[in-house]
């Protein structure tokens, strides 16, 4: 309790003591007790005099109690706020830890799959050139490009595994970005994937990426990802005013196809400025 409250109590006690002393000396001692009826008058006197004083003292005590309760509420509110902040900080720490663990798991799988498809590519690099030649021969014979590429990839387990795994990695990165909201790292992951590709990879993937039999990512999302992150930056292209062609480098009789048929645009090949070939 505060000092002013103690002072109030002492003041009231002293006031009552002084009043009783005065009454005793001035009225009681001179023979007031010879008249029994005067006891009632004495009670009325003390009651009439002390009731307002005690009522006022009770009012002040009530004010003091309200003040104490207000302070306690303020303290409780402050403690509650601090508790909420601690809980929020703890939750954030747990989320950060969870995101860190999620990122570690993702990167372990991501780099493992990258090494896997890099190994596949190394094992059939020469065969891949032969497959590109087979596609070009089919195109020269009038076979539609969709059928020509699909036939070559479908008949090669290594090619089918290589391209399907690459497209699956694109989908895996997209899912991780959406789950962890780590889009600031997206360019790094997609850049590592695009660096795996050479001109033949780009030639095949830019087309079969739009085929659901090879790609489990939605076509719209696949095209948006390729366009946004320049997945086929290593492609061999002819960039004209009205369209872009993609082909295979170092072929004497090169056959290109128009990328407009794939749903991709210049940004997928990092062709920002139009140059007439």
Image (tube, grey):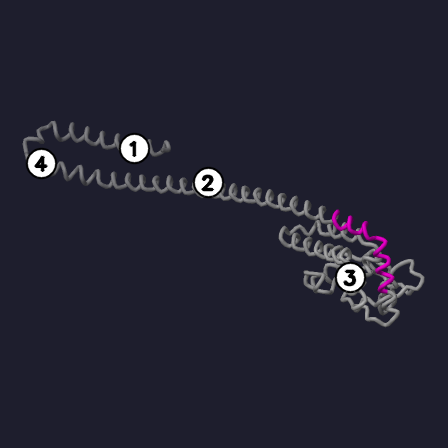
Residue 186 sits above or below residue 79 on the image: below
Q: Can you give x and y, in whole percent of width and height, for residue 22 in the image?
A: 19, 29
CA neighbours of label 2 inside 10 A, class few (<14), some (14 to 19), many (20+) = few
In the image, is residue 267 part of the stretch drawn in magenta?
no
Q: Is residue 3 above or below residue 134?
A: above
Give whichever of discs 1 and 3 has the lower sequence position: 1
Q: Are marks 4 and 3 in contact (CB under 8 Å)?
A: no
Q: Earlier in the sequence, mark 4 or mark 1?
A: 1
| Residue 117 falls inside the magenta stretch | yes
Which of discs 3 and 2 lies nearer the camera? The answer is 3
For discs 2 and 1, the disc positioned in front in the rendered view: 2
Q: Quadrant of the C terminus?
A: bottom right
**Depth check, front residue: 99 or 121:** 121
Query: Looking at the magenta stretch, what is its main secondary structure?
Result: helix
- Residue depicted at 90% across the width and 64% down the height: 254
Q: Are marks 4 and 2 in contact (CB under 8 Å)?
A: no
Q: Nearer the viewer, residue 117 or 85?
A: 117
Residue 173 horizontal side relative to residue 136, left or right: left
Question: Counting residues from the N terminus, which is met first, the one under dot 3 or under dot 2?
Answer: 2
Q: Nearer the viewer, residue 247 or 100?
A: 247
* Residue of label 3: 155
Residue wearing tag 4: 38
Quarter of the image with the N terminus in it: top left
Marking on residue 9 = 1
User: Of discs 4 and 1, which sits in the foreground?
Assistant: 1
Categorize mark 3 by other alpha carbons within 10 Å: few (<14), some (14-19), many (20+). Answer: few
CA distance for labels 2 and 1: 33 Å
Tag 3 or tag 4, which sits nearer the N-term?
4
For marks 2 and 1 on the same chain, the one whose residue lies earlier in the sequence: 1
Tell me which corner region of the image, top left, top right, bottom left or bottom right, holds residue 104. Answer: top right
Q: CA distance from mark 3 to mark 2?
A: 70 Å
**In this figure, which residue is indicated by the disc labeled 2?**
79
């Amino acid at each position: 309790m505060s000092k002013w409250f103690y002072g109030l109590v002492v003041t009231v006690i002293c006031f009552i003591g002084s009043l009783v002393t005065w009454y005793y000396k001035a009225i009681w001692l001179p023979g007031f007790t010879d008249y029994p009826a005067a006891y009632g008058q004495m009670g009325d006197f003390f009651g009439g005099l002390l009731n307002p004083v005690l009522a006022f003292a009770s009012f002040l005590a009530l004010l003091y109690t309200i003040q104490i309760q207000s302070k306690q509420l303020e303290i409780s509110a402050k403690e509650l706020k601090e508790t909420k902040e601690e809980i929020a900080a703890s939750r954030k720490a747990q989320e950060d830890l969870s995101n860190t663990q999620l990122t570690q798991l993702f990167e372990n799988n991501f780099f493992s799959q990258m090494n896997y498809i890099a190994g596949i590519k190394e094992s059939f690099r020469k065969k891949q050139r032969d497959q590109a030649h087979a596609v070009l021969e089919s195109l020269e014979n009038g076979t539609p490009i969709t059928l020509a590429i699909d036939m070559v990839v479908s008949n090669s387990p290594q090619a089918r595994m290589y391209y399907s795994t690459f497209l699956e990695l694109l989908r895996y990165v997209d899912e991780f970005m959406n789950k962890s909201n780590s889009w600031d790292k997206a360019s790094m992951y997609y850049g590592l994937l695009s660096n795996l590709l050479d001109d033949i990879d780009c030639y095949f993937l830019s087309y079969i990426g739009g085929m659901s039999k090879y790609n489990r990512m939605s076509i719209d999302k696949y095209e948006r990802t390729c366009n946004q992150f320049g997945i086929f930056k290593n492609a061999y292209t002819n960039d004209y005013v009205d369209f872009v062609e993609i082909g295979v480098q170092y072929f004497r009789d090169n056959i290109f196809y128009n990328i407009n048929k794939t749903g991709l645009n210049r940004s997928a090949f990092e062709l920002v400025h139009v140059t007439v070939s």
